[in-house]
Image (cartoon, rainbow, N blue to C red):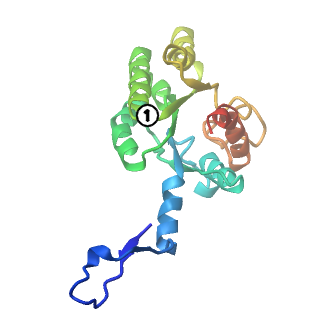
Amino acid sequence: MLAILCVLILPTHLSASTLPAVTLPSTSADQSAQTDAQQRAIVVLGDSISASYGIQREQGWVHLLDTALAQREESWFAVNASVSGETTGGGYARLAGVLAEHNPEIVIIELGGNDGLRGYPVEKIRENLRGMVDLVNESGATPIIVAMRIPPNYGPRYTRAFDTVFSEVATEKGTAYVPFLLEEVALAENMMQEDGIHPTAEAQPLLLDAVWEELLPLL
């Protein structure tokens, strides 16, 4: 609220300090600033699965999340900080800047699929996931880990280790956890693009449903 002292032409025996302060009502700009201050950000740090690869960005699950929050008249909004091709190492390197820019209260970490497809060491993936969770916690935000899976190209030992690293880090860190994001769509007709990796626009509401189940208790 803006307090303005009314300055008048007074007799010499009166000073401005004797005048009452006049408090004016909030302007529309003040109200807008207050509204902005009340908004709370949910950042999605992901790869092409969250970056709407192959479809319109407005069709992606992160945009659907933002729309759902607005429709519920929540004080939350979603920020999509996802980059196609991103790895856990790349996300870890970018995370500090993302946190500083958006000051989120919740960070959804959807990374690791590209690491697995490239055969990156699982222990390195684990280290990066731990590092990202720690950075989010240190910022005062709440992390959510989203699990991914890969085809068995690198053999059963690597595949098993990759499949479990997400839940293991979530358990270790006491972090909210979303099981395999594509569970309901990976083998469903018309739910995957021709590359067999990226979900179609029709699949996006199901991806949102999977995340929403773990996100809702945090809102």
- Residue 101 left/right relative to 67: left
Q: Which one is in front, 5 or 27? A: 5
- Residue at the farthest left position: 12
Residue at x 63%, y 35% (from the top left corner): 215
Q: Quadrant of residue 18?
A: bottom left
Residue at x 53%, y 18% (from the top left corner): 174
Q: Residues within 10 Å of mark 1 (few under 14, many from 20)?
A: few
Q: Which one is in front, 145 or 186? A: 145
Q: Which one is in front, 33 or 94? A: 33
Residue at x 56%, y 43% (from the top left corner): 50
- Residue 182 left/right relative to 102: right
Q: Is 173 situated above or below 212? A: above
Coordinates of residue 181 in the picture (x, y in percent): 64, 31
Q: For numbered disc 1, what is the local secondary structure?
A: loop
Residue at x 38%, y 49% (from the top left corner): 101
Coordinates of residue 68 in the picture (x, y in percent): 69, 51
Amino acid at the residue labelled 1: Gly
Q: Is 9 situated above or below 3? A: below
Residue of label 1: 140
Coordinates of residue 140 in the picture (x, y in percent): 43, 34
- Residue at the farthest right position: 189
Q: Is 21 situated above or below 84? A: below
